[in-house]
């Protein structure tokens, strides 16, 4: 039996997931805890939020994120790729910074407008 703390909402339910009983989840206060508990043991995924360097903007870094969840096991590789990027302003919210990162089908997108400054 695996024990997890659910991260779907601020309640932080203490889940028990019975791997030998079709991943039956107990300890949850809502249905989202059931989905999270099963997924965390079968195929854990995460959303990455980070920053990239940017030139010719009013700040030195721009926030970026994955537009979908990615396999948890690819987080280090994806962060390595994000850390290699240096952008040049202007960049706008939703601009694709890295398409289909590591063949996951997930894009890295900008989360802030950054206009060019002289």
Image (cartoon, rainbow, N blue to C red):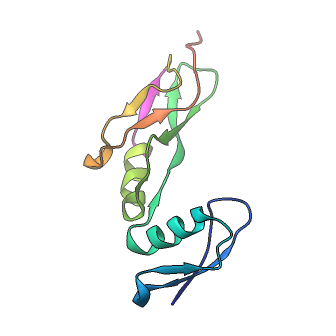
For image coordinates 65% across by 65% down, the residue present is: 30
Q: Which residues are magenta?
A: 83-88
Quarter of the image where one finds residue 68: top left
Total number of numbered labels? 0
Quarter of the image where one finds residue 62: top right
* Most foreground residue, 24 or 40: 24
Q: Judge whether residue 103 is colored magenta.
A: no
Quarter of the image where one finds residue 41: bottom left
Question: In the image, is residue 90 above or below residue 98?
Answer: above
Residue ranking furthest to the right: 11
For image coordinates 46% across by 34% down, the residue present is: 109
Which quadrant of the rendered structure holds the C terminus? top right
Question: In the image, is residue 29 above or below residue 77?
Answer: below
Q: Judge whether residue 85 is colored magenta.
A: yes
* Most foreground residue, 39 or 60: 39
Question: In the image, is residue 24 above or below residue 13?
Answer: below
Task: State the image coordinates of residue 82 (x, y, percent, origin top left).
Answer: 42, 44
* Most foreground residue, 33 or 42: 33
Question: In the image, is residue 93 above or below residue 5?
Answer: above
For image coordinates 43% across by 87% down, the residue present is: 21
Residue ranking furthest to the left: 103
Task: State the image coordinates of residue 31 (x, y, percent, origin top left).
Answer: 59, 64
For image coordinates 58% across by 21% down, the residue present is: 113
């Amino acid at each position: 039996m695996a024990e997890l703390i659910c991260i779907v909402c601020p309640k932080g339910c203490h889940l028990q997931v019975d791997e030998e009983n079709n991943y039956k989840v107990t300890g949850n206060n809502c249905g989202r805890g059931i989905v999270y508990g099963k997924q965390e043991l079968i195929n854990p995924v995460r959303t990455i939020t980070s920053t990239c360097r940017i030139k010719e903007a009013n700040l030195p870094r721009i926030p970026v994120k994955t537009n979908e969840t990615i396999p948890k096991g690819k987080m280090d590789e994806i962060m390595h790729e994000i850390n290699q990027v240096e952008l040049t302003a202007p960049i706008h919210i939703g601009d694709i910074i890295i398409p289909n990162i590591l063949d996951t089908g997930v894009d890295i997108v900008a989360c802030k407008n950054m206009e060019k400054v002289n």
